[in-house]
Image (cartoon, helix red, strand yellow):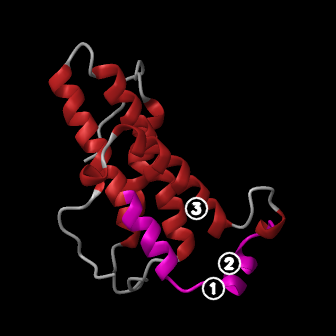
Amino acid sequence: MTSRTPPDDAHPYLRAASAGIRHHTRALTPSDTHPSQPADRLHLDVLHTHLTALHQLLDRLADTTRPPHPTAGRHLATAHTLLWQATSEVHSAFHLLPSNTAAEAETSACHPERLPEGPPVLTICQRHLAAGHSIRRKTTPTDLRPHTTACVR
């Protein structure tokens, strides 16, 4: 079901990111040999990174599309807001998962506590706050409030 990318593809990195997500989704599909595993903090951190990057892209696309095509720009702005809500839920889920510091330290050759931006638990929050500033400049609190939520806080 994959299509060949034309040699003059204008967006090869977006196509590569989409292919990576499709591959990851297929890899998570449970089978007889590999039962499904629950998400862990590292998984959600990487997903949050992807969502915030997509959030920034939608923000820029909405800004550049709105003047010549106002209706399309409004739809992109709506997608931008909805994506922020999804990103916020992933961030909340990250903090609800138990920390497995010993396992994370064994799988990583680096020492996150020595990173200038702090350990990953702070990095996801810093990234989330930076993306939050962007969305709050352009939307109202009412727009940001999810209409329905699957979890009870």
Task: Mark 3 or mark 1: name the one nearer the start of the chain.
Answer: 1
Q: Is residue 38 above or below residue 142?
A: below
- Amino acid at pointer 3: Ile
**Dots 1, 2 in contact, CB < 8 A:** yes
Q: Is residue 70 left or right of residue 28?
A: left
- Amino acid at pointer 1: Asn
Q: Main secondary structure of the magenta part?
A: helix
Q: Residue furthest top?
A: 68
- Spatial separation of the CA atoms under disc 3 and disc 2: 15 Å
**Corner quadrant of residue 86:** bottom left
Judging by the rendered image, the residue that carries numbered circle 2 is 104
**Corner quadrant of residue 116:** bottom right
Which disc is residue 124 wearing? 3
Judging by the rendered image, the residue that carries numbered circle 1 is 100
Q: Residue furthest front?
A: 141
Residue at 39%, 86% in the rendered image = 35
Q: Is residue 9 above or below residue 24?
A: above
Residue at 57%, 53% in the rendered image = 127
Q: Nearer the viewer, mark 3 or mark 1?
A: 3
Q: Which residues are magenta?
A: 87-111
Q: Give x and y (percent) for residue 143.
A: 25, 50
Q: Secondary structure at mark 1?
A: loop
User: Dot 1 surroundings within 10 Å: few (below 14), some, or many (20 or more)?
Assistant: few
Q: Is residue 119 magenta?
A: no
Q: Is residue 95 magenta?
A: yes
Q: Nearer the viewer, mark 3 or mark 2?
A: 3
Q: Give x and y (percent) for residue 53.
A: 48, 44
